[in-house]
Image (cartoon, rainbow, N blue to C red):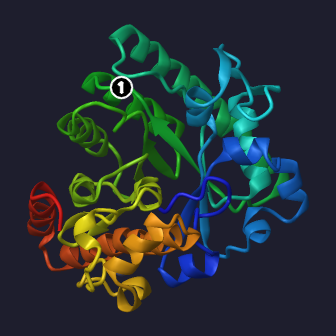
Amino acid sequence: MPVGTQATIKGLRNEAVEELGAEILLANTYHLYLRPGHELVRKLGGLHKFMSWNRAILTDSGGFQVFSLSELRKVTEEGVRFRSHIDGSEHLLTPEKAAEIQLALGSDIAMVLDECIETPAPRDKADSALRRTTQWARRARKYFLEQQDRTGDLKQWQFGIVQGATFADLRCESTHQLLEIDFPGYAIGGLAVGEPHEVTCEMTAEVTGLLPQDRLRYLMGVGKPEQIAEYVALGIDMMDCVLPTRAARHACLYTSRGRVLIKNARYAEDQNPIDPQCQCSVCRRYTRAYLRHLFAAGELTAAILATHHNVHFYLDIMRQIREAIEFGNLAKFSSEMRAKYAAGMA
Ligand SMILES: [Zn+2]
């Protein structure tokens, strides 16, 4: 899922995102709640209509940004109190409120509010955060089901979020507790936040090993191009990451042969496309030399073209993964990707 924090994929018009083949994107509840406000979005017909995007939208709960961006946050059983990073105004985000905001936005998939902690976390802190996360998940589910009863069929799926930091037994406990609540899908949160990659994989495997086959599994906030197939092999269906879009704005391009740092002088006269194997409309038309010049000149177009290519590259990885699964080649595809990225730049 490309990340559209402020109801836009930075640098791409939605028609381009459609052309790239994205079937779902992620939007951030924290940002849209503070600006323009969920009530305004509801009034204007919901997020799909507001941003003119007819395909699926997943919204996060806002929790992660409250814990990472806002000031003066205070966590209690009730919820988390925080000050807006925009104007300093005070807000209280509860599990019910997070669910209500996402219903107002009208996303297709909504996430429950969870407690995010700093990593590496000591065991007692991870343990109490996981307990609170489960209680909040119960309240969020109850609120959602009440709304569903009240309004008829809600066109939204609500996902639970497994926590437990880097402790395998806590991850298992969290998973069991959420399975008891019963969600149509399960996310794994609090990973890929600084721990070694092997630990991310180990924790992911602990959780996916317990999840039922017929429920979606979503690993939040990953990953690097060479890691995506690995996560799929561990049983993950969905991922989101700012990497392709953020890196593009910083002149870092992902290619089938590794990373290209396009500002590098070696590309000044390079007439090749960003990635000779890429079929995206940027690679079919523009050269590395031109893109390097646009970045050097600080032109907006540089970020637009780079983002277009990087998002295409990521979505293409997923297309190749689906194909590899069909032909029974996923392990081979995954190790080839890792080898290319270990080798460094194209
Ligand atoms: Zn391309």
Q: Number of labelled discs?
A: 1
Q: Which of 35 and 182 is in front in this view?
A: 35
Q: Position of residue 32 (x, y in %)?
A: 73, 48
Q: Nearer the viewer, residue 264 or 340?
A: 264
User: Where is mark 1, residue-wise?
Assistant: 165
Query: Which residue is most to the right?
Result: 43
- Give above or below for 7 relative to 196: below
Q: In this view, does 280 lie to the left or right of 45?
A: left
- Circle 1 — which element? loop
Query: Which residue is most to the top?
Result: 124
Q: Position of residue 66 (x, y in %)?
A: 63, 30
Query: Residue 30's image quarter?
Result: top right
- Give above or below for 70 relative to 344: above
Q: Which of 302 and 103 is in front in this view?
A: 302
For image coordinates 66% across by 18% down, the residue present is 73
For image coordinates 78% across by 41% down, the residue present is 34
Q: Where is residue 211 in the image (x, y as percent from the top left)?
A: 35, 46
Tell me the amino acid under the disc marked 1: Ala
Q: In this view, does 262 lie to the left or right of 29?
A: left
Mark 1 vs ligand 1: CB below 8 Å: no
- Give above or below for 73 relative to 340: above
Q: Is residue 13 visible?
A: yes
Query: Which residue is most to the bottom?
Result: 285
For image coordinates 68% across by 31% down, the residue present is 95
Q: In which quarter of the image is the C terminus?
A: bottom left
Q: Where is residue 258 in the image (x, y as percent from the top left)?
A: 20, 64
For mark 1, does the 10 Å Cα neighbourhood hold few (<14), some (14 to 19), or many (20 or more) residues?
Answer: many
Assign ligand 1 to one image quadrant: bottom left
For image coordinates 55% across by 20% down, the residue present is 132
Query: Residue 135's image quarter?
Result: top right
Q: Can residue 146 be seen in this view?
A: no
